[in-house]
Amino acid sequence: MKGDARRQLGQMGEEWAARLLVEAGLAIVARNWRCAYGELDLIAQEVAPDYSQGGVAATWLVVVEVRIRRGTRFGTAQASVTPTKQAKLRTVAEAYVQAVEWQGPWRIDVVAIQLDGQGRLIDQVHLRHAVMG
């Protein structure tokens, strides 16, 4: 039963995150992409400046890790993106970029959703460029 509750919490977090991203102007292009290295929660695209190209507007591929926590007993949602998790995200994101032959700029964002012990929303934050390549 615990696995089902955890899966439901994760799905709820992904729905909240997708809404937050769409409201911020991103377009969701894929969900739960899997490969041999792991899974990506959400993949989106956003038109934003590419400062490596002088700030000209470009379509960015945005890989999004969704972290949701009920209570803080095991730490916050934001703190759960450990260096080990970041390294895995980079590996899986690179596999996705290669699989779809993406040629433009890309980044890894995190949406951290914090709930209280009763499951009520306390905070949700979209961290752009949260994991550096």
Image: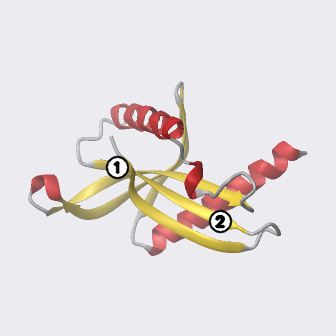
Mark in front: 2 vs 1: 2
Q: In this view, does 118 lie above or below 93?
A: below
Tag 1 residue: 107
Q: Quadrant of the N terminus?
A: top right
Q: Position of residue 20 (x, y in %)?
A: 52, 70
Q: In this view, does 8 lie above or below 113?
A: above
Residue density around tag 1, few if under 14, some if 14–19, many if 20 or more, within 10 Å: some
Residue at x 25%, y 48% (from the top left corner): 105
Q: In this view, does 7 lie above or below 16?
A: above
**Which of the numbered marks, if any, corresponds to residue 14?**
none
Secondary structure under the numbered disc 2 in the rendered image = strand
Q: Where is residue 25 in the image (x, y as percent from the top left)?
A: 39, 71
Q: Quadrant of residue 120?
A: bottom right
- Residue closer to the observer: 22 or 75: 75
Tag 2 residue: 114
Amino acid bearing label 1: Arg
Secondary structure under the numbered disc 1 in the rendered image = strand
Residue at x 23%, y 41% (from the top left corner): 103
Residue at x 26%, y 57% (from the top left corner): 59
Left or right, residue 88 beside residue 57: right
Left or right, residue 115 beside residue 106: right
Q: In which quarter of the image is residue 17?
A: bottom right
Mark 2 or 1, nearer chain start: 1
Circles 2 and 1, Cβ within 8 Å, touching? The answer is no
